[in-house]
Image: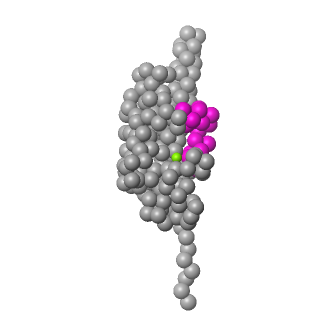
């Protein structure tokens, strides 16, 4: 008798596929880092693009984030190929304003990073700077209904991560300074 198929999750494979599909869909970590820079440069003038990219990588290393990226890209691609059931096919292909599940999926990323992530997500969604403008370009023939929100959410989450870490660093150095005064 043949053994039933046993499902084993391969975390490395999920992480690798996430990187691969983001690249294949035309999004680089640097482009997401530039969004982070835009969101945080007024608060931290010394912030570098390399630091932003490191924080994007940290966000991308989380399974919740990888799951959202892979699910969103898959739905975008199925819509591009016309393979979804009607009327969902047209709702996703035409990025129907009242659909909203793309934003909800992206919120599963932001949820991991608290309220700063949430406000930044709303901000980039309205403004659509940098790579988000390209993803929203409907004349390209590509469908990025899910990916644009996901990329915005990754940038917003990396921004929140930076804000929390910088605050912790600041408190630590203030504490050390006060210890030295004692
Ligand atoms: Mg969208």
Residue at (55%, 70%) from the top-left corner? 7
From the viewer's side, name the closer residue of 153 and 86: 86
Q: Is residue 136 above or below residue 88?
A: above
Residue 15: where, in percent of width, then height? 45, 54
From the viewer's side, name the closer residue of 22 and 66: 22
- Most common SS among magenta residues: helix
The part of the chain drawn in magenta is 104-123
Q: Is residue 112 magenta?
A: yes
Residue at (39%, 28%) from the top-left corner? 48
Residue at (53%, 58%) from the top-left corner? 90
Q: Is residue 12 visible?
A: no
The picture quadrant where one finds residue 179 is top right
Residue 153: where, in percent of width, then height? 53, 41
Q: Is residue 76 above or below residue 115?
A: below
Quadrant location of the N terminus? bottom right
Quadrant location of the C terminus? top right
The scheme the figure's colours follow is one colour
Q: Residue furthest bottom?
A: 1
């Amino acid at each position: 008798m043949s053994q039933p198929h046993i499902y084993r999750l391969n975390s490395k494979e999920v992480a690798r596929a996430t990187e691969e599909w983001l690249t294949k869909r035309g999004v680089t970590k640097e482009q997401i880092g530039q969004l982070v820079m835009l969101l945080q440069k007024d608060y931290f003038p010394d912030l570098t693009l390399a630091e932003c990219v490191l924080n994007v990588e940290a966000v991308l290393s989380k399974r919740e984030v990888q799951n959202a990226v892979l699910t969103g890209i898959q739905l975008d691609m199925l819509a591009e190929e016309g393979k979804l059931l009607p009327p969902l096919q047209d709702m996703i292909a035409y990025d129907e304003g009242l659909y909203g599940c793309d934003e909800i999926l992206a919120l599963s990323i932001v949820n991991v990073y608290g309220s700063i992530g949430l406000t930044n997500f709303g901000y980039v969604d309205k403004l659509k700077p940098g790579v988000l403008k390209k993803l929203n370009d409907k004349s390209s023939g590509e469908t990025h209904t899910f990916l644009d929100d996901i990329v915005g959410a990754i940038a917003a989450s990396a921004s929140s991560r930076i804000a929390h870490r910088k605050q912790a660093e600041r408190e630590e150095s203030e504490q050390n300074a006060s210890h030295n005064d004692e």
